[in-house]
Image: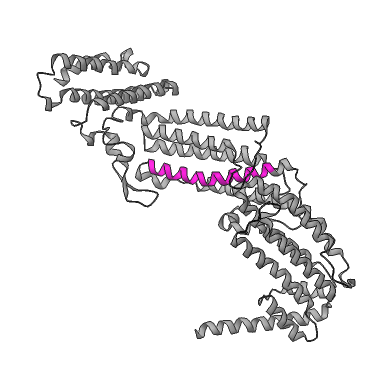
Amino acid sequence: FLKTHLSEYTILYQESQELAWLDKIDRRYAWLKRALVEYDEKYSRIFPVHWEMAERLTVEFCKITRRELGNIMLKRKNEIDVKLLRFAIEKTVGFETIVEKRFLGNTLDHSSNPITSHLNVKVTSINGNDDLNLATNLKPKSSPFQGIISQCFEDHLDIYIAELDRSLGDQIQKFVDELKKDGYPIFEGGEDTSNVLPTSADLFVYFRNCLVQCSKLSTGQPLLLLVQTFQKYLREYANRVLTANLPKTNTTASSLVGTATIFIQNLPNIPSMLKEGETIAKLNEAEICRSCSVLCTAEYCVETIQQLEDKMKEKITKSLVDKISFESERNIFKVIIAESIQILIQDLENACEPALTAMTKLSWQTIETVGDQSLYVTTIINHLKSIVPIIRNHLGSSRKYFIQFCTTSFIKKFINHLYRCKLINTIGAEQLLLDTHSLKTVLLDLPSINLTVSRKPPQNFTKIVLKNMTRAEMILKVVLTPYDSPRQFVKNYLQLMNNDGDISSFQKVLEMKGIRKPEQAHLIERLKREHAAIIASHQQQIQQQ
């Protein structure tokens, strides 16, 4: 009965017929609608209801259609363009939806449906809950007809992906052109706001829509092609929209690539990326704001890329999950974060550089009285008060990066300049100690500097400032230590410097005190012996425990 009633269809729509091609695919589905109307009128009362002959007729039609479409598309692949493919897919998916509403699929052999059998696998949800049935998650069991015909288009989705590729390319170019025309959007700022470029959200919304469309048609190899397309345009966005709009610095791209791994593995170590003496031209406020926006957007991209990866792993066939990774793309945006921070920190350091240099040129051996904080300290504080609020405001919720790294980097630079102060007398050391304390107080207040309502800084931030500025204070206390006995001086040094046996640091302190080279050599040897004894004693205590 089924074969007889479908014989007309197989003749009308055989490969050699004009009706068989994709541009007339809707006529195939119109034919079945007429056939079902005819069945209802002539045969519905003849066959028992539980035989479900109308559904069986539809299932057989779907199987024939899937097979015939697959054959003809294979032979005429060169004639398929994305417009035609999209038309055929839309009409087919629409037909499947109509069929789903009419029939329950009781006669459908689920093992013969390549979509449902292909997806009936287990995966673990990303939030760690119980296993989810992917067939239920993506292709509900209440819709067994979903994909019964449209699965035949899977082998040709590369055409669809290629069109998405072109469309994304146009989208990136649009982003670039808009920035050139209108500039970076003005950010009003705020405590819990984020200075993220709207185009980044637009890009991920586009990705999401592409993923939804593609996963309805396939959860197999075509999704891997989609992954590659997303990866390509994430890199394009990073390079053409973000990196290209950072203020130009003396730091080359190769040096950033070289330090990328360090940054990625240990984010707080970014100050090690800042080369001593490397300078850039002073940034204007627009450039500062742009750098902040790039940083915030890169941070948003790192977080959202992870969500995209999780979603794609959730959608794709279990056997292909391990082939999806956006780690390289995340790293690219992490490097952009590093570069943005570096630009902002260098700009602030450049503003403070003249004052720090002035500190090293003061005649510290002739200071006779300790007064208020020195002029160079006041100058540094004024720079911090003028620049930091602008950056903090434009970083919004991402300000944690700058404040922490700025403080760490600045203190390192301050200590390096402190070492360059020579022949310091006792009064001079006391004045430097007072200046250092003034700076420490301001640095601790950096997160809320110039805010109407003061707030307590993060505990981790306070810990970093205290640790590093305490080292600066200890250096000056060593300078204040009397040099009566070499042995006692070395012991005092190790005690104040937390048993730091670094020869270079010790030698710099000796030069600050004005100790002559011959005496330095003797003291360095004593330091080596004393430090070795401390290490040996510590190891012995560990062994005894």
Q: Position of residue 4 (x, y in %)?
A: 16, 17
**In the drawing, does residue 42 fall left or right of residue 111?**
left
* Residue at (24% x, 25% y) in the render: 102
The quadrant holding residue 357 is: bottom right
What's the image's color scheme? one colour
Q: From the image, which quarter does the N terminus lie in?
A: top left
Q: Position of residue 33 (x, y in %)?
A: 25, 17
For the residue pair 319 and 315, the one nearer the viewer reads as 315
Question: Residue 58, percent across and down?
Answer: 22, 23
Relative to 109, does residue 354 appear above or below in the rendering?
A: below
Q: Is residue 188 above or below residue 69?
A: below
Identify whether 224 is placed above or below 409: above
Magenta span covers which residues? 289-316
- How would you classify the magenta stretch by its main secondary structure? helix
Judged left or right of residue 360, residue 58 is left
The residue positioned 83% from the left and 66% from the top of the image is: 372
